[in-house]
Image (spheres, rainbow, N blue to C red):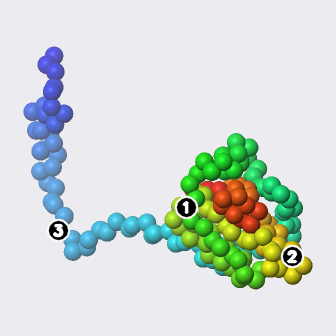
């Protein structure tokens, strides 16, 4: 039996049968309608109010993180090696936010906007400078105590740790975000 090399080649009997089957078929009239394929809508970035809302919804569940000399956070399911890498600056800091001199409400709002911006730009590692609280009443670093609790509530935060001295030391934290 001969081998067919061309997939479009057909047996003469097949062509005869096809033409016989199609002889009484009338073509459809041309349509004035154009079929447009729907494009998927562009994803809309989360608004900062949603980010703040996400931070607010678990306010009672996540109290402020206890702050000591080497405070850190690691989301459950993320390896300890990830935290070690973050401490050792394995990832390049892609942006930073300075919250010096802001009230808690203003700092929280700025943090929400910053995290939204980082997510839009697909940043993986950012630095947040909260200050050491030297100018605060009673010398208590209010933002330092609050920022950890806010970050834990934001689901895109995988881990954070105190920055190295050259990056701000106890007045700043490195944050690892989901890509």
Question: Mark 1 — residue?
Answer: 94
Residue 52 disc label: none
SS at badge 2: helix
Instruction: Out of 134 and 29, give the one closest to the viewer.
Output: 134
**Marked residue nearer the N-terminal end (1 or 3):** 3
Q: Left or right: where does residue 133 sit relative to residue 32?
A: right
Query: Label 2, on which residue?
Result: 139
Where residue 153 appears, x then y in whole percent? 75, 65
Q: In the image as oriented, which residue stretches furthest toward the top?
A: 1
Label 1 vs label 2, nearer the camera = 2
Instruction: Judge the density around disc 2: few (<14), some (14-19), many (≥20) Cα neighbours within 10 Å.
Output: few
78 relative to 39 in the view: left or right:
right
Residue 32, position as x, y percentages in the image: 21, 74
Residue 158 visible within the image: yes
Residue at position x 39%, y 67% from top?
A: 39
- For label 3, the residue is 29
Horizontal placement of 89 versus 101: left or right? left
Q: Secondary structure at mark 1?
A: loop
Query: Sequence-wise, which precedes: disc 1 or disc 2?
Result: 1
Residue shown at 74%/66% (left/top)?
A: 171
Observer-side mark, 2 or 3, equals 2
First along the sequence among labels 2 and 3? 3
């Amino acid at each position: 039996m001969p081998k067919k090399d061309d997939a479009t080649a057909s047996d003469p009997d097949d062509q005869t049968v096809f033409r016989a089957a199609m002889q009484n078929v009338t073509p459809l009239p041309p349509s004035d309608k154009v079929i447009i394929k729907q494009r998927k809508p562009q994803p809309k970035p989360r608004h900062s109010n949603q980010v703040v809302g996400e931070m607010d919804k678990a306010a009672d569940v996540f109290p402020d993180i206890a702050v000591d000399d080497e405070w850190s956070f690691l989301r459950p399911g993320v390896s300890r090696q990830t935290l070690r890498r973050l401490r050792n600056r394995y990832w390049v800091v892609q942006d930073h936010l300075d919250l010096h001199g802001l009230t808690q409400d203003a700092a929280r709002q700025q943090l929400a906007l910053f995290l939204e911006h980082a997510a839009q730009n697909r940043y993986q590692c950012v630095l947040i400078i909260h200050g050491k609280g030297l100018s605060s009443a009673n010398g208590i670093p209010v933002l330092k105590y609050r920022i950890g609790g806010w970050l834990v509530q934001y689901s895109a935060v995988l881990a954070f740790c105190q920055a190295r001295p050259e990056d701000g030391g106890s007045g700043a934290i490195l944050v690892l975000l989901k890509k």
